[in-house]
Image (spheres, rainbow, N blue to C red):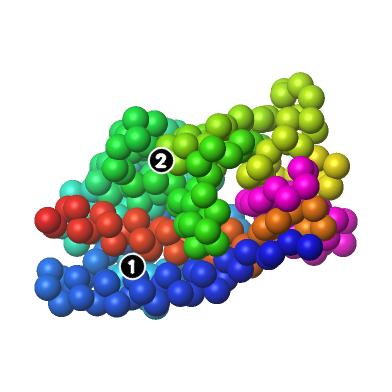
Amino acid sequence: MSVTIDGKSLAAKLRGELKEKVSRFAAEKGEIGLAVVLVGEDPASQVYVRNKIKACEEAGIRSFSYHLPAESRQADVEALVGELAASEKVDGILVQLPLPKHLDERKILALIPAEKDVDGFCAENVGNLAMHRETIVACTPFGVMKMLEAYGIDPKGKRAVVLGRSNIVGKPMAMLLVNADATVTVCHSKTSGLKEVCAQADILVVAIGRAKFVTADMVKQGAVVIDVGMDRDENGKLCGDVDFENVKEKASYITPVPGGVGPMTITMLLYNTYIAAIRRRS
């Protein structure tokens, strides 16, 4: 029987600690500010942005929210991000993805200075991560590493498999695990013998966006299973990329959906904003 990793409780604990740090920082050097840019009316994005703004308020971080219409021109979005990049009141900038299809996401994100890139997506921060230098790290993989640390799971010497190769989760997750001295394999839709590769993992991180894709026969006995997925099952119920009920019988540790990785992602966004403020004003 596995141990369920309680991301919700861990996130609450970390946010409590962070709130105290933010308060001390604000008393000495002024309020920390996070700018959030939302373009369009995507319902999921609107929910994410509301949650991020609420989390900021609870942590004592000031949020600057900008909601642009879906038909906004490239030049208008770029102009806003440029203003935020130059603003002394803004320590971190977050452009909510996905953007409307007519906008050039890469050009817009490139306008965010590395020191304000609290999502950890810019080339400089990703490059620093690859070179094992201190940097701002993508929030979800960063949260996963904090979970492993909190539960005493050391990746050193372990075989880790990351299922998914996105720039947001898969690739930075793999680099963090390499930096933690794990031996890492990255799998994707074109991987041959996927089931066999996954079944060799001591630590299996799943981020592919397919409901209950990972079944018990893909998991090694005693493996640590981290489910980054956020899907809906055949009944419309929220679930992850892992068949939780069956896999938990083989795993030593496993994250649930909801209540696992999700709460940690916003927590690490707040942490990244705090770190960005320290570096900018030191």
**Apparent side of residue 222 relative to residue 181 in the rendered image (left or right):** right
Nearest the camera: 250 or 147? Answer: 250
Q: Position of residue 259 (x, y in %)?
A: 63, 67
Nearest the camera: 205 or 66? Answer: 205
Q: Position of residue 100 (x, y in %)?
A: 53, 43
| Residue 127 position (above or below residue 151) | above
Q: Does the rendering let one see residue 136?
A: yes
Nearest the camera: 93 or 16? Answer: 16
Question: Residue at coordinates 29% horizontally, 77% vertically from top-left?
Answer: 20
Q: Which mark is residue 267?
A: none
Question: Residue at coordinates 55% horizontally, 74% vertically from top-left?
Answer: 9
Q: In which quarter of the image is the N terminus?
A: bottom right
Residue that carries the numbered disc 2 in the rendered image: 121
| Residue 192 position (above or below residue 180) | above
**Dot 2 alpha-carbon crowd within 10 angstroms: few under 14, some 14 to 19, many 20 or more:** many
Secondary element under disc 2, as helix, strand or loop, is loop
| Residue 180 position (above or below residue 250) | above
- Residue type beneath disc 2: Phe
Magenta part of the protein: which range?
Answer: 219-247
Where on the picture, by quarter, is residue 240?
Answer: bottom right
Q: Does the rendering let one see residue 144?
A: no
Q: Position of residue 149 (x, y in %)?
A: 48, 57
**Residue 234 lies in the magenta stretch:** yes
